[in-house]
């Protein structure tokens, strides 16, 4: 990052992630002050590309994660109600966001429907009130162009090195997770943070052992 120019900010997210919902509440004030490119991506495709399982796919971790999210939301004063089932298919919500221009208002409305009101977000029918509120073209949600745009978003995230959501990109530096927000803000205020010798050393730290498949 360069201190002489404003860094490019991109936020990669999926509506399936309650951590993305929590992070959006932290990021929204910054989005009012400066341009942030909001990039909806298919988290499942990101996981598949890295050969990973999501937290909700691991027994025990799933239940713990849900309770942790609720605890975090209450501690942070963020209204949260889980949708009727989770994980759910988020593709319609992601495509709706794209059709609505991936604006902060669209992100607000879709997150609010799923994670504040606890509503289903896995079909055009389920999202009909949000579609109407945003004035979006319901027919465009399932179009080839919209599907291609979501694939392009996801591929661009993978090319950028994204391995999870939410991820805030400041130029080429990635900050993964709701709990990395303060780290990202510090880096935004102090671009020289990663020039620290120990930070530099960690980028070259050798792998000591690898787990066999």
Image (tube, rainbow, N blue to C red):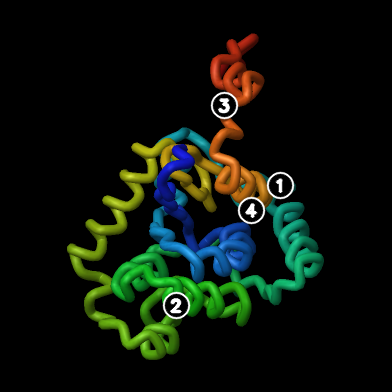
- Comparing marks 1 and 2, which lies closer to the viewer? 2
Lower sequence index among marks 3 and 2: 2
Residue identified by numbered label 2: 105
Sequence-wise first label, 1 or 3: 1
Q: Which residue is mark 4?
A: 178
Q: Nearer the viewer, residue 180 or 166?
A: 180
State which quadrant residue 155 falls in. top left
Q: Residue at x 24, y 65 (%)?
A: 146
Q: Is residue 193 left or right of residue 33?
A: right
| Mark 1 vs mark 3, CA separation in Å | 36 Å
Measure how far apart labels 1 and 4 are at the Cα level.
17 Å
Placement of 127 over or under 192, stated as above or below: below
Marks 4 and 3, Cα distance to the nearest angstrom? 24 Å
- x, y (%) of residue 105? 44, 77
Q: Is residue 18 visible?
A: no
Residue drawn at 43 percent across, 50 percent down: 6
Relative depth, front residue between 41 and 201: 201
Mark nearer the viewer, 4 or 3: 3
**Residue beneath disc 3:** 195
Residue on which disc 1 sits: 61
In this view, the mark in front (1 or 3): 3
């Amino acid at each position: 990052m360069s201190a002489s120019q404003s860094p490019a900010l991109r936020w990669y997210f999926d509506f399936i992630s309650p951590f993305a919902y929590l992070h959006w509440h932290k990021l929204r004030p910054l989005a009012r002050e400066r341009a942030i490119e909001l990039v909806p991506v298919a988290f499942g495709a990101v996981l598949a590309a890295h050969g990973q399982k999501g937290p909700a796919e691991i027994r025990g971790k799933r239940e713990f994660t849900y309770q942790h999210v609720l605890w975090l939301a209450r501690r942070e004063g963020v209204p949260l109600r889980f949708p009727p089932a989770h994980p759910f298919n988020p593709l319609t919500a992601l495509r709706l966001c794209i059709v609505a221009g991936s604006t902060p208002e669209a992100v607000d409305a879709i997150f609010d429907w799923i994670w504040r009101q606890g509503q289903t977000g896995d079909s055009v029918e389920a999202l009909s009130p949000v579609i109407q509120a945003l004035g979006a073209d319901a027919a465009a949600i399932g179009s080839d162009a919209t599907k291609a745009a979501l694939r392009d978003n996801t591929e661009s995230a993978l090319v950028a090195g994204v391995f999870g959501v939410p991820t805030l990109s400041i130029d080429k530096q990635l900050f993964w997770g709701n709990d990395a927000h303060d780290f990202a803000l510090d880096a935004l205020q102090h671009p020289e943070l990663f020039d620290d010798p120990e930070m530099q050393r960690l980028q070259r730290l050798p792998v000591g052992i690898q787990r066999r498949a």
